[in-house]
Image (cartoon, rainbow, N blue to C red):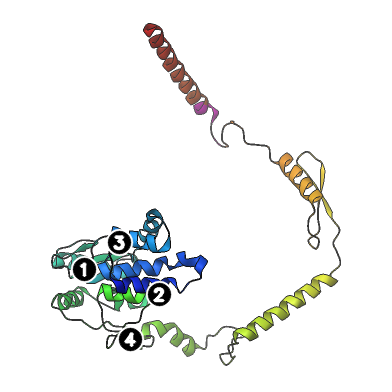
Amino acid sequence: MSVFTEETRERAREIIARYPADRSRSALLPLLHLVQAEEGYVSPAGVTFCAEVLGLNKAQVGAVATFYTMYKRKPTGDFLVSVCTNTMCNVLGGQEIYDTLSEHLGVGHDETTADGTITLEHAECLAACDYGPVMTVNYDFFDGVDPSTAIGVVDELRAGERPMPTRGARLCTLKEMAVQLAGFADDRDGAVADGGPGEPTLRGLRLAQQHGVSVPGFDPNTPIRSKAEADKAAAKAKAAEATAKAVEPAKPDSPVKGGDGASATVPAETSPPGPRHAQKAEAAGVAANPPASDGKPAGDATGPQERNLNDASASAGGANSAAESETGAQK
C-alpha cells in the first residue's frame, strides 16, 4: 500500500462510502483530488493508492488522471495561474497578458517558478467571456485584467500575500482547493463568500427589460412544481397517451418492394413487429444492399487504379522471383 497519511486514508474511506457498494468506482474522481491535496499533484504513488483502495488496476486510474486537466501529473506550484487565450479573451488581449506573465516569471506553459510558488498555464476557455480578458488563480476569477494588473497579482502571490479575486472567496493554495474538490468543507475564515451576478452577465436581461422582450407565454410568477407534483403530472400525461393509443384504429400493413422486386410487409406502427415481419424485412434489405466488392470507389478514374494495381503486382512478382532465386541458391 502506498504511503499516505492516516487522515487521507480516513477521508478516502469517507469518499468511497458516499457511493453504493457496487458503484465504488464512481469515487475515483474525488479520490484523485484527495491525493493531489496531499502531494500537490497526482503522483505514481497517488495512482497506486487510488487503484488499491478501489480494486482497479493502475492503467484504469492513469487513464482518468491523464484525461482531465485539473489533475496535474508533475509537481505544481502553490498557485496555478491560468490565462484565457481563447477567441474572445484573445481579441481583448489575453495572449499579451500571457506573454507578459511568461516573461516576467521566466516560465512557459505548465512550468513552475524556481521558488515553487506559481505554475503558469494558458487556458483554452475559462467560461467568462463577458468579463474578458480573464485569468484565474486556483480556479478563482480575476476579471478584466491587463498586463499590469496581472503582474501585480502574481507579485503579491510571490510575496506571500493573498489578493482578493474579483468574484468568490479569498484565495487558497492548490492543495487547499483540491480538498474542497474532493468534497470536504474549507473551515478557513473567508473560505466561503456570497456574490451575485455582475453587470456584464446581466446586460442581456437589462436590455430585454428595457425593450420589453420576453419568451412567448412565459409567466415569471408560475410556481416551480415539487418533484412529487412533477411525477404526478408525468404519470397523468403517460396514462393519457396510452389511452389515446388504445382507441386509435389499427393501420393496415403496407407492402413494400425489396431490391429483387419481392414484396415485404412492414407492420403498422401500432403493432409490434413479429419474427415473420423481421425476417421478411431483413431479406428485403439484403436484396436491396449487395455486399461491397473490390470494385473501384465511386468517382475514381479507372486508369490510375489499374496502373497502381499493375505496379503493385509487378513489384510483388519481382520480389517473389528474387526470393525464389535466393532460396534455390541456398539449396
Q: Check disc 1 and give the amino acid type.
A: Gly
Q: Position of residue 326 (x, y in %)?
A: 38, 11
239 lies above or below 324: below
Pointer 4: what residue? 192
Q: Earlier in the sequence, mark 1 or mark 4?
A: 1
Amino acid type indicated by mark 2: Glu
Label 4 Cα crowd, 10 Å radius (few <14 / some 14-19 / many 20+): few
Whether 45 is drawn above or below 115: the answer is: above
Q: Quadrant of the C terminus?
A: top left
Q: In the rendered view, does 316 fall on the left or right side of 247?
A: left
Quadrant for the N terminus in the image:
bottom left
Residue linked to disc 1: 77
Q: Which residue is mark 3?
A: 2
Query: Mark 4 near mark 3, Cβ–Cβ under 8 Å?
Result: no
Residue under numbered circle 2:
14
Residue interval drawn in magenta: 299-305
Comes first in the chain, label 4 or label 3: 3
SS assignment at label 4: loop
Q: To which quarter of the image does residue 138 belong? A: bottom left
**From mark 2 to mark 3, how far is it between C-alphas?**
18 Å
In space, the residues marked 4 and 2 are separated at their CA atoms by: 23 Å
